[in-house]
Image (cartoon, rainbow, N blue to C red):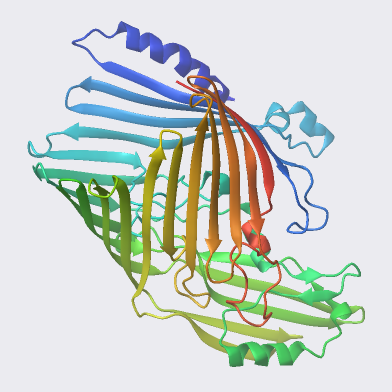
Amino acid sequence: MAARWLVPVLLVALPAAGRAADDSGPKLQLSGTLSSDVRFDIERYRGVGNQGYDFSVNRNDLTLHADLMPSERVVAVIDARLRYYGFNRVVALSDTSDRDKIDPFSVQLDQAYVAVRGVPVASMDLKIGRMIQQWGAADMFNPTDNLNARDFYDPMDYTRKVPNQMLELDWYPAEWLSLQGVVVPVFKPSELPESTAMAYLVETDARGCFVAAPAAPLDRAGALELANKFGSVDPCQLHFGTPQVNTLMPKNELRDAQAGVRAKIKAGDLEVGLSYYYGRFSFPVAVDAQASATVTSSGTDVTYLAEVYYPRMQVAGLDFSYSAPWLFDIGFVGELAVIFPEQVDFGLRAFVNGSKAVELKSRNVSDKPFIKATLGADYTFTKWLYVNAMFVHGFFDEFNDAYGIHNYAVASADVKTFEDSVVWRASAVMSVDDYSAVLNPQVTWVVIPGVEVLAGAFVYVGSTHPSDPNDYAAREKFGQKAAGRSIAFVKGRLTW
């Protein structure tokens, strides 16, 4: 229950501390947001059973940011979030006596670090603690940015990252040059949405008969051998349990630490970044699977176990941003990441009544280097119209495994009306390869400065069924059920 007192104490004590400080003493700056978010699932066919056409999110967030400056050379930064969920977690009658079940909440600490200027020498700064780094020049799609894992638990908040403990050293040898080195001792994976579990979903029809299972990352010959081996079994006699997916996490050893260096060069309207990262890919890659079938008098019971892995990688990066005064001040951004991956081999074994029936192997990730890139431009046509467009080669979670690297077109437009108090936004991400897409229309009403009301939708477009059930790469990026369900939302936000 201590967490329930955290925010009231901060709200009362911290401003008081700030007022108590004089010009020669410690200084405190506070900011934050208070938001209320309600979402409704507007379709059902991407869910399981009768999921859909109901409220999927109902929560309130209080975010606090504090900068404490005990001296001119030292600053401590804290970003904390208190989240209250509008849905209760009452299962048993005894839960109705537990306030935490009726009114569940969580406390999150996004950043907590100390920065010291002029250490170890005058032109250097030192940071240590829990941080979120942002490398690259493009908006959202940053293939050169790998120090923090992505936080995709909330698909609508796709710019968030998983914070991590780091040691950062910044050096400013010249006005036009800055150098940065970062060490991340412990690996943290990306946080994935709940819909991810549907990637391993076994589909059945209304009678409970087997319809389809996710394709394994096998080559064509292996996939056909597996399909032929079990294709003669009566689908209504197959009974699948819930698939179990285990993660093979890196150990917390020195050799599994991550590190990166980056140089940033300024030349007039041009900024160029050169970077290198050594670490791991933060999204899981399939490495192993095992299926066991037990024949009984009532049919065939099947259990399925899969293992995923976070492969090592090295990334050499180049990014730039440029505002072209000779071309209507159009802004250009670009990023190029050359990724040197660790080879990942996939193996699958199937057993029938304890005896091995088939064993297959395939290369899921080659050790050959591959490229991910982003190229974009933005332009303000008038004071009421802003447009941004990008071409993206390689989505966040793509690692040139059996699924491959795909291409995407990204675009957004803002139209400001009523003296900028109402902003209409239309944005979309479309796969150029399979034409599936995500559409995000939204309107923002600025009630008064600092108070906003937002409404809109987040809509997935595409087929939920792969064109070839035996082909691991045949599924559509935004059509598959693992992408999530389409929603409508209303959100209120206070910022100070």
Taking 101 as reference, is 336 above or below it?
below
Horizontal side, residue 403 vs residue 38: left or right: left
At 66% across and 38% down in the image, what residue appears? 489
- How far across and down, in percent of the image, does residue 362 sit? 52, 86
At 91% across and 70% down in the image, what residue appears? 207
Taking 160 as reference, is 146 above or below it?
below
Total marks placed: 0
- How far across and down, in percent of the image, does residue 32 sit? 45, 25
- How far across and down, in percent of the image, does residue 431 sit? 54, 65
Q: Quadrant of the C terminus?
A: top left
Residue 69 shows up from this direction: yes
Taking 403 as reference, is 496 above or below it?
above
At 31% across and 39% down in the image, what residue appears? 129
Q: In the image shown, does 319 or 100 lie closer to the viewer?
A: 319
In which image quadrant can residue 171 be found?
Answer: top left
Taking 272 as reference, is 349 above or below it?
below
Horizontal side, residue 147 vs residue 104: left or right: left
- How far across and down, in percent of the image, does residue 227 sit? 71, 88
At 80% across and 75% down in the image, what residue appears? 211
Residue 397 shows up from this direction: no
Horizontal side, residue 426 vs residue 80: left or right: right
Q: In the image shown, does 432 or 147 lie closer to the viewer?
A: 432
Q: Quadrant of the N terminus?
A: top right
